[in-house]
Amino acid sequence: SFKPLVFSGVQPTGNLHLGNYLGAIRKFVALQDSHECIYCVVDLHAITAQLVHGDLAGQTRSITAAFLASGIDPKKHIVFNQARVPQHAELAWIFNCVARIGWMNRMTQFKDKAGKDRENASLGLLAYPSLMAADILLYRATHVPVGDDQKQHLELTRDIATKFNNDFSARIGELGVGVEMQVGDESVNGFFPITEPLIEGPATRVMSLREGSKKMSKSDPSDLSRINLTDDADTISKKIKKAKTDPEALPSEVEGLEGRPEAENLVGIYAALAEMTREQVLAQFGGQQFSAFKPALADLAVEKLAPIASEMRKLEADPAYIDSVLRDGGERAGVIAEDTMKSVKEIIGL
Ligand code: ADP
Ligand code: NA
């Protein structure tokens, strides 16, 4: 079977928020003890929305600083930015020829991001999930920690791997570059693993603090909608205080959160930050009003986020160090990437 390997990425667009932290980065940190991990700042993804000359390098350093400040160890694992390893784009092109247009047209993130004027969206935005599949499969990663919004893209990654493995199974066997894997009743020789998404816990989809029906996002125009990783204690408290809620007290059972998206969101955030279950949070706060719960949540958020923000500031004061981390990580990633592309080309006959 495939060697267990974790891969995930974060785009260098805008401020990192609590959703990114709880849905992704915190899990990246936790997986380091049990797995080999590759964490990538996906700058080639960031240009799909808008291609203009901006401070992409600065944003990339800032995400890298957040990774390191959160506790990712760039010596034991690999931290780099995508554009340093040209094989991401090279494999994405191959995958553009594996994936079908119909698969891409079904992606809800594309529909959301493209909006009404779909004909005017970049071709890169449509092909985004194919690049994401390349990011993951270039390292033949078996596990991908992500937020719930990435579930559909992970399914597409599995579809691409499955189609490639099936289309080329004879050739993969001939070259001896595959791994025996079970597909239904059949044993086939696959080159790419069928990657497992890791989407678990109480904060896989952190919602906006202003609208319980929208996910917390970097692109939300309202700064009150999200807690940024770099917000100071006063700002965090203010945002939680202003977070939309309902007039009821907190329920004492999880079932009582049904139909109360704002309450559910805040309880989920508390649970994730405190490393408790939602049941345990409600056992503690059930029956209390938000006026009592919100200050406790604010204190907890400050306690968990302030040390990360202060460490980020220190790291960001030394851009040369961050660049050296990315350079070193890029070199190590490049060795694996080159090896994969050599086999892919042999398989295809390029
Ligand atoms: P964004 O969606 O904020 O633009 P990215 O696309 O770079 O950020 O996503 C980085 C990671 O953060 C992904 O794994 C994504 O699933 C996760 N993520 C983003 N927003 C949320 C959220 N509101 N709740 C949980 N996870 C999230
Ligand atoms: Na996202």
Image (cartoon, rainbow, N blue to C red):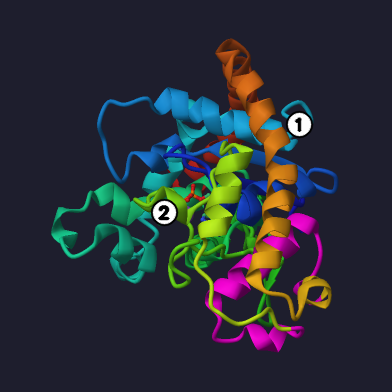
Residue 79 in view in this figure: no
The residue that mark 2 highlights is: 130
Stretch of the chain drawn in magenta: 252-279
Residue 316 against residue 214 in the figure, above or below: above
Side of 96 relative to 167 (left or right): left
Give the CA separation, mark 1 to mark 2: 28 Å
Q: Is residue 90 one of those drawn in magenta?
A: no
Location of residue 144 in the rendering, given as x and y in whole percent from the top left corner: 64, 55
What SS does tag 1 mark? loop
How would you rate the neighbour count of disc 1 (Cα within 10 Å): few for under 14, some for 14-19, many for 20 or more? some
Per the rendering, the mark at residue 73 is 1
What residue is shown at x 76% (from left), y 79% (from top)?
A: 286
Q: Quadrant of residue 255?
A: bottom right
Does the beta carbon at disc 1 come under 8 Å from ligand 1?
Answer: no
Location of residue 25 in the rendering, given as x and y in whole percent from the top left corner: 65, 46
Q: From the viewer's side, name the closer residue of 238 and 75.
A: 238
Q: Main secondary structure of the magenta part?
A: helix
